[in-house]
Image (spheres, rainbow, N blue to C red):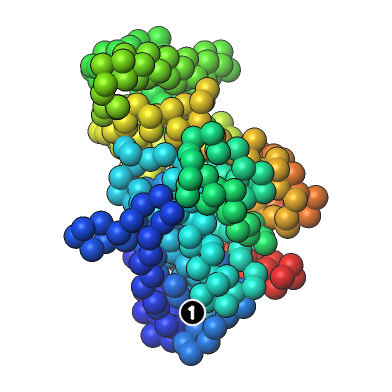
Amino acid sequence: MIDDSDLLAKLDRQFIGVTSPTSPRIMAGGHPCQGIYTTPKGQRPKTAFIATHYNVDFSEHYIAPYLAARGYGFLGWNTRYRGAEDQFLLEHAVIDMGVGVRWLKEQAGVETVVILGNSGGGSLMGAYQAEAIEPTLGDLLAGAGLQALNTLPAGDLYISLNAHQGRPEVLTDWMDASVVDESDPTLTDENLNPFNPDNGPPYSEDFIARYRVAQRARNQRITDWAKAELARLNAAGIPDKLFPLFRCWGDLRMMDGTIDPSERPTPMCYRGHPAVANKSPSIGRANNLKTWLSMWSLETSKCQGKEQLEKFRLPALVVQGKADTGVFPSDAKKIFDNLGSADKELHMITGAHYFEDSRKVRDEMADLLCAWVAKKR
């Protein structure tokens, strides 16, 4: 772990806990929206970043001290779904994010808000900005919720930092296509098994093509089942139920570095060797039926990048670390291509997913972000 205690000693950090238009403070005292605002000591920056994830706690985000030390505010923001991925619903998440953006503008005195989409939070931040531009989720809520959706404050600049294209896209790209039965993680179609040495690596073009089709088919099978099961339960007066998901560290790019080449090590994923990680529950490991349809389904989810990014007209920056083992060069290029903004830049730079390589690598990345913001604000 990189030691940045010297930076933190020069900064102020303020804990924020507030309610949401669709979620009150719980009886035990916790607020649905929480975060930490990091700023230069004794200053009130006019420009600030905000970053949120679907379920990971971003309040103590690694980049906060680096940006604050360079004169900016940074709000590491959590919605009600921090640590509760299985309950996620996009419409309520963007409302909670709007609470954070509004706090920056109305309470912290910020004039320029930089929407920072990092890692899995990239598509969520993109969805937020897109909803602030053109609301599409209003049919899911009424009253205070609908009002909040229709009045989301938009950000002024957008940065994609080592971000996945979208939640359905990344899960599907990582899915083990050889799964035969979602209720039994041991059953495998060996003709599609990415860990069967007879198949590779290196993988043939034919295998890659068949594998990608099978991954999408697996996502659709789960979607079809979730829709039918939700209808069956609702007819009996049951609102939802949990179900497990297994074997989702099977992206061929994690095993074969000749596919989408970069500086990453292979075989490798965020959990170590993919053959080992794939046997343990991880991304999307538990879902409500409604959560699957809201977050992960290629058919029904609005957490996909393309349709959101196409709405953008604000200045945008895409930054991708070349040693990232879970976001690949083609992902960053697709994000860049999908951005509707005319004013946009793409930078491929040194670094792993969280730029944990060294303090120098993090400093270089932070310098790039801050130099770009300084030109645009």
Q: Amino acid at mark 1?
A: Thr
Task: List the single residue furthest toward the right.
Answer: 342
Q: Which residue is mark 1?
A: 39
> Of helix, strand and loop, which one carries label 1?
strand
> How many numbered marks have been drawn onto this rendered protein structure?
1
Q: Is residue 136 left or right of residue 377?
A: left
Where, quadrant-wise, is the N terminus in this rendering?
Answer: bottom left
Task: List the single residue furthest toward the left.
Answer: 28
Tell me the quarter of the picture where residue 85 sits. top left
Look at 58% across and 54% down and name the residue there.
152
- Mark 1 Cα within 10 Å, few/some/many (few <14, many 20+)? many
Kindly tell me whether residue 58 is visible in this rendering: no
> 213 or 40: which is nearer to us?
40
Tell me the quarter of the picture where residue 114 sits. bottom right
Kindly tell me whether residue 84 is visible in this rendering: yes
Say if 246 sits above or below 153 in the image.
above
Look at 36% across and 16% down and name the residue there.
231
Residue 179 in the image, given as x and y percentages of width and height: 34, 16
Task: List the single residue furthest toward the bottom.
Answer: 42
> 137 or 173: which is nearer to us?
137
Where, quadrant-wise, is the C terminus in this rendering?
Answer: bottom right
Residue 298 in the image, given as x and y percentages of width and height: 51, 25
Say if 95 sits above or below 39 in the image.
above
Residue 157 in the image, given as x and y percentages of width and height: 67, 60
Look at 56% across and 31% down and name the residue there.
259
Look at 59% across and 53% down and name the residue there.
151
Residue 220 in the image, given as x and y percentages of width and height: 46, 17
